Amino acid sequence: MILQNLVAKGFFLSLIYLLLNRSIKNYTAEKHLQTVNRHRQNALATFGAFVEAAGENRETRDAVLLAATKAIFDANQSGYLSAKTSSSDTASPVQQIIKEVIPTKSTTDSN
């Protein structure tokens, strides 16, 4: 009888722990995505102002584009996720495409 009560209480406690743990993980993931998306929105909103400030200087505009791309597509730390899930130092595919499309200084000098 005692063993049956312990198993029943253990089952309900583990079920409550599982639901609480899952809820906390979902909340932190949602807050992380909310913060990162707000950061991306701010980067996109200010990109136009930086391009206008660069004027006709193509080199400056390309540098602004690369910086904005990095700010938008890097996996940013929001403080909601643990340090175990930190991002790697590799560039995202979008960043690699932008770097290939924009000519570097050495390739424009040789043309």
Image (cartoon, rainbow, N blue to C red):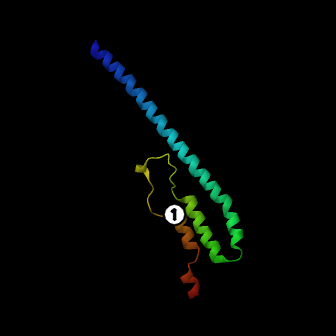
| Residue nearest the viewer, comparing 17 with 77 | 77
Vertical placement of 74 versus 38: above or below? Answer: below
Give amino acid for label 1: Pro
Q: Residue at x 67, y 61 (%)?
A: 46
Which residue extends farthest top?
A: 1
How many numbered circles are shown? 1
Judge left or right: residue 80 versus residue 43: left
| Residue nearest the viewer, comparing 78 with 65 | 78
- Residue 4, x across and y down, in percent: 30, 16
- Residue 32, x across and y down, in percent: 53, 46
Judge left or right: residue 44 versus residue 15: right
Q: Residue at x 61, y 51 (%)?
A: 38
Q: Residue at x 57, y 69 (%)?
A: 98
- Residue 84, x across and y down, in percent: 40, 50
In the picture, which quadrant includes the N terminus?
A: top left
Label 1, on which residue? 93
Circle 1 packing at 10 Å, graded few (<14), some (14-19), many (20+), is few
Vertical placement of 93 versus 29: above or below? Answer: below
Residue 109, image quadrant: bottom right
In the picture, which quadrant includes the C terminus?
A: bottom right
Q: Residue at x 58, y 59 (%)?
A: 72
- Residue 107, x across and y down, in percent: 55, 83
Question: What secondary structure is found at the residue carrying circle 1?
Answer: helix
| Residue nearest the viewer, comparing 1 with 52 | 52
Residue 54, image quadrant: bottom right
